[in-house]
Image (cartoon, rainbow, N blue to C red):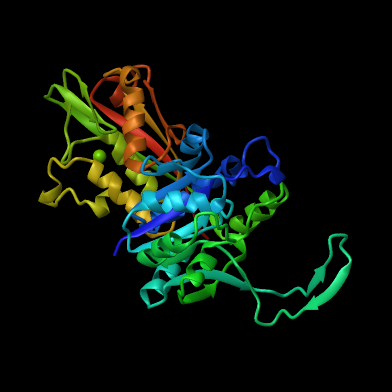
């Protein structure tokens, strides 16, 4: 069963202020848009499409924080944007349509919605009870009547649908019709919709003060963890070393059971440290012949997957190489880019640097090379 996500981010969000549309403004350490993109990616969505306003592709790409996202230019209305986005998403079994202005999305919510569709509903959406009284008012804010709140709920996004149901529903909608949301489109086509319990953290960012409220809601359920790692390998015969997955020509090689990539080994230990998941030796025992000569990318991808399984989000990594030679400087950007690519992180959240030990100690004498790393993760408390 394939799952696709369509994030609608084509609005201009003027009420929120801040100089640029709210979906590109920072919230709890990363752009608003990145939170939803990440939640869908972690939940296993195979395709993620973001509908954006014409001319904002560069801003959107930077804010999304991942490379495996497709951007399409939306239309003049939300309905038009969804039509374009659905076409780009193609033939997936389950489609989730989400507003970028609701960044409090969690992978668990995505999973619950997909499950509701799998259980037999044509569509599903999160909804909350209403505890305040409802009144009808006129344009001058004079009360003109009561509204019975029993039987009413507040609906949020994402809204999940069988792919064929929502595609057909939009196809049946006359081109000039504008509707309030996708549930309405599906309902008009006769779909049965299951509402599941929503969450306050899925609140919609509308006004500038909403950002602080949502940050507090998100903080209440996430904790920041920093893990550290260290590794060292001895030099031996060879003509290159591999550091951060980059082959660096050298008059010596590094000895080790795997490819001896000390930089990524330290980073794997840092990620495992932030997760409380032991060390690299426990996950990939040197005594196990299957890891002989292994590409350390396997280890790094495994650590990143463990983080995703724990519902954690990698925020930042920092690697320091400790050696006299080879010179790291000329290869630093390639090492950074490769690490960012494997972890699916934007470049500014990956740091690679180097130092010598002024010819002191084992690295100073050129006996070997060492690396240390930190990894910062945000994870459910
Ligand atoms: Mg090692």
Q: Nearer the viewer, residue 132 or 317?
A: 132
Q: Which image quadrant is residue 326 in?
A: top left
Please give left or right for residue 139 compared with residue 369 in the image: right
Measured from the top left, where is residue 82 in percent x and y? 48, 53
Measured from the top left, where is residue 136 in percent x and y? 80, 71
Measured from the top left, where is residue 46 in percent x and y? 33, 54
Please give left or right for residue 176 compared with residue 229 in the image: right
Q: Residue at x 69, y 55 (%)?
A: 213
Number of numbered discs visible in the structure rendering: 0
Q: Nearer the viewer, residue 250 or 278?
A: 250
Measured from the top left, where is residue 258 in percent x and y? 17, 40
Please give left or right for residue 251 compared with residue 32 in the image: left
Ligand 1, image quadrant it occupies: top left
Q: Nearer the viewer, residue 153 or 223?
A: 153
Q: Quadrant of the N terminus?
A: bottom left
Q: Which image quadrant is residue 306 in?
A: bottom left
**From what the image shows, is residue 372 above or below residue 218?**
above
Q: Is residue 327 visible?
A: yes
**From what the image shows, is residue 188 above or below residue 209?**
below
Q: Nearer the viewer, residue 164 or 353?
A: 164
Q: Which image quadrant is residue 10 in?
A: top right
Q: Residue at x 31, y 33 (%)?
A: 338
**From what the image shows, is residue 230 above or below residue 207?**
above
């Amino acid at each position: 069963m394939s799952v696709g996500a369509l994030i609608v981010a084509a609005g201009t969000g003027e009420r929120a202020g801040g100089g640029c549309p709210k979906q590109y403004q920072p919230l709890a350490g990363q752009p608003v848009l990145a939170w939803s993109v990440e939640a869908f990616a972690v939940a296993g969505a195979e395709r993620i499409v973001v509908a954006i306003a014409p001319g904002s592709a560069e801003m959107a790409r930077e804010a999304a924080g991942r490379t495996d996202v497709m951007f399409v230019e939306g239309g003049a209305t939300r309905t038009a944007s969804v039509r374009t986005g659905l076409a780009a998403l193609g033939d997936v079994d389950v489609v989730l349509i989400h507003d970028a202005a609701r960044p409090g999305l969690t992978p668990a919510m995505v999973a619950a919605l997909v499950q509701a569709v799998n259980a037999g509903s044509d569509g599903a959406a999160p909804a909350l009870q209403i505890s305040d009284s409802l009144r009808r008012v006129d344009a001058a804010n004079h009360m003109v009547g009561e509204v019975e709140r029993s039987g009413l709920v507040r609906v949020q996004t994402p809204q999940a649908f069988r792919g064929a149901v929502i595609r057909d529903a939009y196809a049946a909608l006359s081109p000039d019709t504008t509707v309030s949301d996708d549930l309405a489109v599906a309902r008009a086509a006769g779909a049965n919709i299951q509402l599941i319990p929503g969450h306050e953290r899925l609140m919609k960012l509308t006004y500038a003060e909403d950002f602080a409220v949502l940050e507090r809601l998100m903080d209440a359920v996430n904790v920041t963890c920093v893990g550290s790692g260290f590794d060292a390998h001895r030099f031996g015969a060879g003509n290159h070393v591999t550091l951060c997955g980059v082959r660096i020509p050298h008059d010596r090689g590094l000895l080790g059971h795997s490819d001896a990539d000390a930089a990524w080994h330290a980073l794997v230990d840092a990620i495992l440290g932030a997760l409380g998941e032991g060390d690299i030796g426990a996950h990939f025992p040197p005594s196990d012949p299957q890891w002989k000569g292994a590409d350390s990318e396997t280890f790094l991808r495994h650590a990143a997957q463990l983080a995703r399984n724990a519902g954690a989000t990698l925020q930042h990594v920092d690697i320091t190489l400790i050696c006299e030679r080879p010179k790291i400087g000329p290869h630093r950007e390639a090492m950074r880019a490769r690490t960012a690519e494997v972890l699916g992180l934007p470049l500014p959240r990956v740091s690679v640097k180097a130092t010598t030990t002024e010819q002191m100690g084992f690295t100073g004498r050129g006996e070997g090379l060492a690396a240390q790393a930190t990894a910062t993760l945000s994870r459910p408390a």
